[in-house]
Image (cartoon, grey):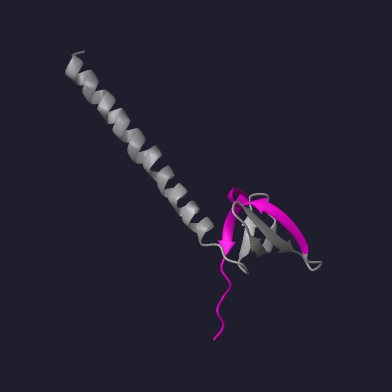
Amino acid sequence: MDTPVIIIYIVCILAFFYLFLIRPQKKRDKQANLMLSSMETGDGVVTIGGIIGTIVIIKDNEVIIETSIDKTKISFRKVAIKEVIKPEIEE
């Protein structure tokens, strides 16, 4: 094979990796950071372990949630939050 053909193959492979692997991952990371930064006291959350609760206190890198009827409080790091559920506004 000629050297220019090999270079074209390498460029195509790099473009494939960028378009289908790197770029979508950066987009998911940006959405996750936006979700974590928009958390407020009173929002519902689901952790990566499947625990569901309501945010009571937000500190720097820590979130304290309240779960169950007994009002159990559990502390988590922000990165352990999988989903934030905003409360519905009633009119």
Please state, as top left, top right, bottom left or bottom right, where the C terminus lies in the image. Answer: bottom right
Please state, as top left, top right, bottom left or bottom right, where the N terminus lies in the image. Answer: top left
The x and y percentages for residue 40 are: 57, 66
* Point 22% across, 25% down: residue: 8
Left or right relative to 63: residue 70: right
Q: In this view, which residue lies farthest toward the right?
A: 70
Left or right relative to 7: residue 31: right
Left or right relative to 23: residue 42: right
Left or right relative to 38: residue 69: right
Q: In this view, which residue lies farthest toward the top?
A: 1
The x and y percentages for residue 38 are: 51, 62
The magenta stretch spans which residues?
A: 72-91
In this rendering, the answer to whether 17 lies above or below 34 is above
* Point 29% across, 34% down: residue: 15
Task: Name the residue nearer the viewer: 1 or 64.
Answer: 64
Q: In this view, which residue lies farthest toward the front?
A: 60
Task: Name the residue nearer the viewer: 82 or 2.
Answer: 82
Q: Is residue 42 magenta?
A: no
Task: Name the residue nearer the viewer: 24 or 40.
Answer: 40
